[in-house]
C-alpha cells in the first residue's frame, strides 16, 4: 500500500464502493437484510445466496437499470410467479 500510486489507491477505493453500492446497498434496502430474523445454522448463508441470485437474475434479464429497478422487478415477479418460474427454467 505504501508503494502504490495515488491513482491506484483511488481505483481500489472506487472498486470497493462500487461493490458496496451495487450489491450490499440493494441487499440492505430492497431486501431489508439487516432486519432478517434467520440466525441459525446455514440459513443466513442460504438466504444471502438466494438474494444474490435474485439480484443477478434481475440484472441479467432486465439489463436496463434506468427503467427497471430491483424492487420493481421483485414486485412484478410477485404478481406473476408463473413468469418468474418460466424465466428460471427456460434455457
Image: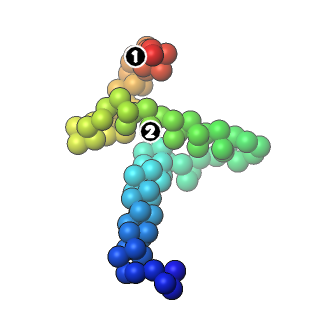
Count of marks placed on residues: 2
Question: Is residue 48 left or right of 7 when viewed as pictured?
Answer: right
The image shows residue 83 at horizontal and vertical percentages of: 40, 16
Mark 2 surroundings: few (<14), some (14-19) or many (≥20) residues within 10 A: many
The residue that label 1 is drawn on is 83
Residue drawn at 77 percent across, 43 percent down: 41
The image shows residue 68 at horizontal and vertical percentages of: 27, 36
Q: Is residue 5 above or below residue 79?
A: below
**Res 34 visible:** yes
Query: Looking at the rendering, which quadrant does residue 67 occupy?
Result: top left
Q: Is residue 10 above or below residue 63?
A: below
Camera-side residue of 15 and 66: 15
**Dot 1: element:** helix
The image shows residue 69 at horizontal and vertical percentages of: 31, 40
The residue that label 2 is drawn on is 55
Residue 26 disc label? none
Query: Looking at the rendering, which quadrant does residue 61 occupy?
Result: top left
How far apart are labels 1 and 2 at the CA level?
16 Å
Camera-side residue of 6 and 63: 6
| Mark 1 or mark 2, earlier in chain | 2
Amino acid at each position: 500500500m505504501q508503494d502504490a500510486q495515488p491513482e491506484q489507491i483511488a481505483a481500489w477505493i472506487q472498486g470497493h464502493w462500487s461493490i458496496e453500492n451495487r450489491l450490499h446497498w440493494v441487499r440492505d434496502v430492497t431486501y431489508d437484510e439487516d432486519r432478517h430474523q434467520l440466525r441459525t445454522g446455514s440459513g443466513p448463508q442460504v438466504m444471502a445466496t438466494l438474494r444474490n441470485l435474485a439480484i443477478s437474475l434481475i440484472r441479467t434479464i432486465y439489463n436496463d437499470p434506468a427503467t427497471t429497478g430491483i424492487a420493481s422487478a421483485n414486485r412484478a415477479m410477485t404478481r406473476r410467479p408463473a413468469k418468474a418460474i418460466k424465466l428460471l427454467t427456460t434455457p
